[in-house]
Amino acid sequence: MKRTRWMVTIMIAVSLTTIAGTAHGATFIDIHDNPHREAIEDMARLGILEGVGDNRFAPELELNRAAAAKVAAYLLGYTASDAQGAASWTPIFDDVHIGMGQHEWAVGWINLVASEGVIIGLGDGNYGPGNALQSVQWVTILTRILGHEEENMEWPHGYNRMAADLGLDAGFDYQGAAIVNRGEMARMTATAIFDVERPDGTKIIDVVDFDIVEDHEDADEEDFVIYSDVRLSVSASEPLLAAGGGQTMVITARATHGAGLPAANTRMGFFAAVDTPLDYRDRRGQLSATELTTDSNGMARVTYTTLAADDDQHVFIQVGAPQGNDWTEQGMYILASDTASLVQGRVINPFTGDPYSGASISFDAMDHSSHTLHEDATDEDGRYALAVSPGDYYMALNLDLGDAPHYTGEYGGSASHLRVDNTVILRLNVEIGEAQTYTLDTERGVVRGTASNVGSDGNLYAVGSDGTFIAEINADGSFMIAVPAGRYSIGTHTGTVLIDGVSVTAGSVTDVGSLSR
């Protein structure tokens, strides 16, 4: 586990140091001298084209049939939500299905364009998602989308003539048999969207409601803001997704600085991996972006699309941002499973009852087979909802009470550990079954006092309806423990009751005074 987390940290650090321009909007650092730059930027503004990572577009990269399906589907007016739904259709092609591997992200897009007859298969029952396209093949796709395909058109000459008739060959040396690259594809596609009329006189730009991405001018390194005190939080639109792959969730990262002010226009790097003690698999390719710039609210969002190979595996998402001359990072887990359960509840400051936001919550399997840490897991109301695989766990809620003067010293026990630095660990044991929702009572109150002459065991035992909780007695006789609300009897390990009927309220302190046998 340590090895993997260090690898994640290093990768994010390297990623952050290589960003040299805005990572969203319409600017890429490798298109400044490309003849199709304007077309690429137009496609990016319309939300059609994305980079390949590191704020690059790779205009010379070949266009394959998987990527072509996504662009074609956008031109038909389909959205990512439509593609997500189409991914669950009965397979149309033998080589396009959930679990197919490298191009699994394109299953829904391919199903959509195939159902429209815009891109057809190879004739042997396969689609060939990784196959490169010729320029004339992309012209054929655009011709069909524009409604200009004629009955019994001769292949390929009829489509090459159509490229000239519609002006799709404008702006570059069109060679129908040549493999089309991403830059040339953007050039032809921009022409099709903005310049070519369909038979009814309208243009694609007139009838398709594109998701316009905010435009940005070119930015140099100095245009980014680097804060000295960044704090990150990360959340997912859904903590638990269905198994089978092709499920998409939105990852929202928020950066603040100072007294909770938005850290606007700063850089963020995103990383994803299957991260377990026995397995490590890079999943950056499933993210919609690996670098972004925060908006005026300090927010940046990416999507993650699951793979069938990751079912029942916790996928670790980490976000990093520069902080002074260093960087800071924050992580979380997401899970796709039909057997996992949802664990939810609320965390409060056990001394005051105030909601506790940003608590880290961990689950350690009792058989030591797994450890999962959900960082910054509680919202502003102290609530959490976490996806947990079936099993028996030691659950720990980690709180930092800062400089609050609730106690001095250190206090141990079976249900809590109140550390000298005012960090608090609240503990409980949980049994998680399959496909259920558990609402846990994780709000705690505090019992404190002093004890003497209680025997050689050195502990006190608080017995209530929720179980028995052990409080360790310090050398000076003091003890303190955080327990669920309820009524307790407090006694020794031999069963001697020192005080009965102790009422504990969540979010408040009950002082039982001096106890002695």
Image (tube, rainbow, N blue to C red):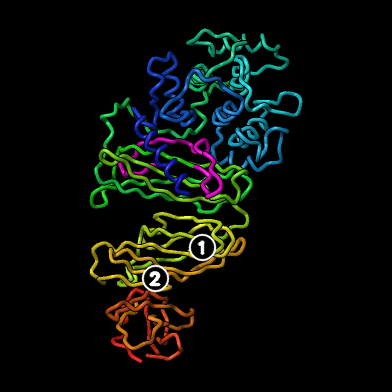
Are the residues flagged by discs 1 and 2 in contact, CB closer than 8 Å? no
Q: Is 57 or 162 nearer to us in this picture?
A: 57
**142 lies above or below 111:** above
Amino acid, disc 2: Ser
State left or right for residue 146 relative to residue 364: right
**362 lies above or below 224:** below
Secondary structure under the numbered disc 1 in the rendered image: strand
Query: What's the residue at 72%, 23% (across, down)?
Result: 122
Residue that label 2 marks: 416
Q: Which mark is residue 275?
A: none
What segment carries the magenta color?
Answer: 273-301
State left or right for residue 16 relative to residue 202: left
Q: Is residue 300 magenta?
A: yes
**261 lies above or below 151:** below
- Locate the C terminus and report the quarter of the image it occupies: bottom left
Amino acid, disc 1: Val
Residue that label 1 marks: 343
Which mark sits nearer the N-terminus, 1 or 2? Answer: 1
Report which quarter residue 350 is drawn in.
Answer: bottom left
Residue extending farthest to the front is: 456
**113 lies above or below 357:** above
Q: Position of residue 342 (x, y in %)?
A: 54, 60
